[in-house]
Image: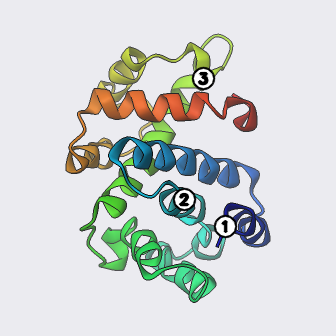
């Protein structure tokens, strides 16, 4: 499946524009991580783009999140992609993250929320105003973006990345698509 086909599938299954933008953001972060780590950018980007494809179907039943995605995507993507999507909700699916791809998705999903929340409290609400130092400060403020799991962000260490390097890669990835994100 290529990116255009994946986007069509996302649009068929996700009507909330904020969720779609989140998926696009996670995809950009995943591509940046793949590039830096010498992994498959297309596959990693696809995982990021598709990871919440079942979100609207499973809002009322979070335990199904990731599992329902398998029903939508089976036969269209690799088993590695399906497993990573299920593993990003490991607390509910029971699919423990084991690979770099799986750990990267968990970290990227969480850090996207921290970065966007940080941009939204800036004077002009722009990603260009956010710095790595901003993210470090906001990360330590437990009352800031409370729904963003700091523990999940720290999955970056399972990729051999320091938090600072991870923030740098993720922030630059989102700055690269700031126009698309409206930030």
Residue, disc 3: 127
- Is residue 147 among the parts visible in the rendering? no
| Lateral position of residue 174 relative to residue 138, left or right | right
> Does label 2 or label 1 sit earlier along the sequence?
1
Q: Position of residue 100 (x, y in %)?
A: 29, 59
Q: CA distance from mark 2 to mark 1?
A: 8 Å
> Does label 3 or label 1 sit earlier along the sequence?
1
| Lateral position of residue 86 relative to residue 9, left or right | left
Residue, disc 2: 42
Residue, disc 1: 2
Dot 3 alpha-carbon crowd within 10 angstroms: few under 14, some 14 to 19, many 20 or more: many
Q: CA distance from mark 3 to mark 1?
A: 28 Å
Which residue is pictured at 39% across the width and 64% down the height?
88
Instruction: Give the secondary structure at mark 1.
Output: loop
Which residue is pictured at 61% across the width and 83% down the height?
76
Q: Position of residue 152 (x, y in %)?
A: 31, 49
User: Does 111 appear above or below 133?
Assistant: below
Instruction: Give the secondary structure at mark 2.
Output: helix
Which residue is pictured at 34% across the width and 29% down the height?
139
| Lateral position of residue 16 relative to residue 59, left or right | right
Instruction: Give the secondary structure at mark 3.
Output: helix
Q: Nearer the viewer, residue 39 or 165?
A: 39
User: Does 75 appear above or below 119?
Assistant: below
Which residue is pictured at 74% across the width and 57% down the height?
16
């Amino acid at each position: 499946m290529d990116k255009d086909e994946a986007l069509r599938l996302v649009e068929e299954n996700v009507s909330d524009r904020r969720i779609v933008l989140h998926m696009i953001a996670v995809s950009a972060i995943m591509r940046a991580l793949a590039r830096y780590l010498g992994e498959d950018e297309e596959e990693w980007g696809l995982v990021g783009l598709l990871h919440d494809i079942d979100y609207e179907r499973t809002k009322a039943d979070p335990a199904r999140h990731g599992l329902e995605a398998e029903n939508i995507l089976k036969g269209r993507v690799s088993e590695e992609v399906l497993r990573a999507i299920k593993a990003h909700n490991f607390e509910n699916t029971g699919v423990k993250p084991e690979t770099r791809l799986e750990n990267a998705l968990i970290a990227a999903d969480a850090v996207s929320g921290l970065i966007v929340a940080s941009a939204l409290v800036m004077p002009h609400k722009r990603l260009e105003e956010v710095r790595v130092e901003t993210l470090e400060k906001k990360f330590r403020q437990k009352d800031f973006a409370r729904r963003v799991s700091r523990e999940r962000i720290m999955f970056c260490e399972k990729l051999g990345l320091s938090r600072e390097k991870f923030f740098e890669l993720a922030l630059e990835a989102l700055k690269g698509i700031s126009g698309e994100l409206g930030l």
